[in-house]
Amino acid sequence: MIDLRSDTVTKPTETMRQLMAKAAVGDDVYEEDPTVNELEAYAAELLGKEAALFTTSGTQGNQAALLTHTVPGQEVLMDEEAHVFIYEGAAISAFAGVQSRTLPHTGGRISPELLKKSVRSDDIHYPETGLIWLENTHNRGGGTYLPEVYLKEVRKIADEAGVPVHMDGARLFNAAEASGMSAARIASYTDSVQFCLSKGLGAPVGSMLAGSASFIRTARKKRKMLGGGMRQAGVIAAPALHALKEHRALLKHDHGHARLLAKAIQSSTDLTIRHDVQTNIVVADTDTSSLSAEEWVARLEQEGIRIIQYKPEALRFTTNSDVSREEVETVCRKLAEIQ
């Protein structure tokens, strides 16, 4: 099967497996795992932050950030299709006890005017605005990145309001590759950032949370509260460190493959792409197609191609390091045959 459901489906490389077998380990709850410590130090340096924390998943990293930044009863400003709002099982309210205030967006960008207006005033009837939430790249926005001019505007609004900014940067390095900005430059506009090791970078498990030293000290305790205290975690930190060092340069190939897919979809099918294909995600709408989203998924499955129905009338194709250019070209040919 050619699997384009997500960039989470990648398998660890042989090099990763060898590194797992040979990893130096210790008890990470005591901060004694040398491989985890090396990973955290490298991630912090790469993002220009004082410290970083290895978490089991992006969701756990996001929730640890929420628990660290906010107190129960506060409100978090985010776009209406944010991953933390749709795909994290209402953990934001169940664990942190805060409410989401969701706002309309374009590619993950809430208009600065609306964002500024949405920061709560000092009124006893209102919750306090505890955090501004960004997502980069934007999952449901078609993998679009946040431009620097927008990041600057959000930072200015946050500073004027005295509110911290967290970035769910699950695909942060895709954003860096597409925008030409370094990950550190992107992260400089935020107080904290989470990024996944197990998506485009191809590690088998894990995410990183980065911020100030004091923030990470508190987040480490919150991770423990969430059940994320790990013991000899070097066996999973080793492939993650390798992916972070060696696989960032490979993301440009995934982006090129996505553009190739998008061109084929637009030229040889009755599907419609309504977003700028900037990274490794292509969302194709089926409202103009003679086939439903369900039918497209089933027909492609019959041809040995896996995608997902992303919305009631949309499909998602996500390129990843386990899919070669030849396989992408095969998908392009098969798409033209399905009508």
Image: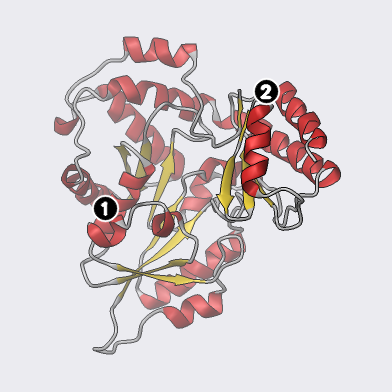
Amino acid under disc 1: Phe
Residue that numbered label 1 is attached to: 215
- Count of labels in the image: 2
Q: Earlier in the sequence, mark 2 or mark 1?
A: 1
At x 31%, y 36%, the residue is 56
Q: Is residue 34 left or right of residue 175?
A: left
Report which quarter residue 129 is drawn in: bottom left
Would residue 11 be seen by someone viewing this image from the given angle? yes
Residue that numbered label 2 is attached to: 324
Circle 2: is it few (<14), some (14-19), or many (20+) Cα within 10 Å? some
Quadrant in the picture for the N terminus: top right
Distance from Cα at disc 2 to Cα at disc 1:
40 Å
Secondary structure of the residue carrying tag 2 is loop
Would residue 252 be seen by someone viewing this image from the given angle? no
In the rendered image, the vertical position of residue 294 relative to residue 22, given as above or below: below
- Tag nearer the camera, 2 or 1: 2
Of 161 and 66, nearer the camera is: 66
Secondary structure of the residue carrying tag 1 is helix
At x 24%, y 18%, the residue is 25
Q: Are marks 2 and 1 in contact (CB under 8 Å)?
A: no
Amino acid under disc 2: Ser
In the rendered image, the vertical position of residue 191 relative to residue 143, given as above or below: below
Report the disc number at residue 185: none
The x and y percentages for residue 70 are 26, 64
At x 50%, y 28%, the residue is 202
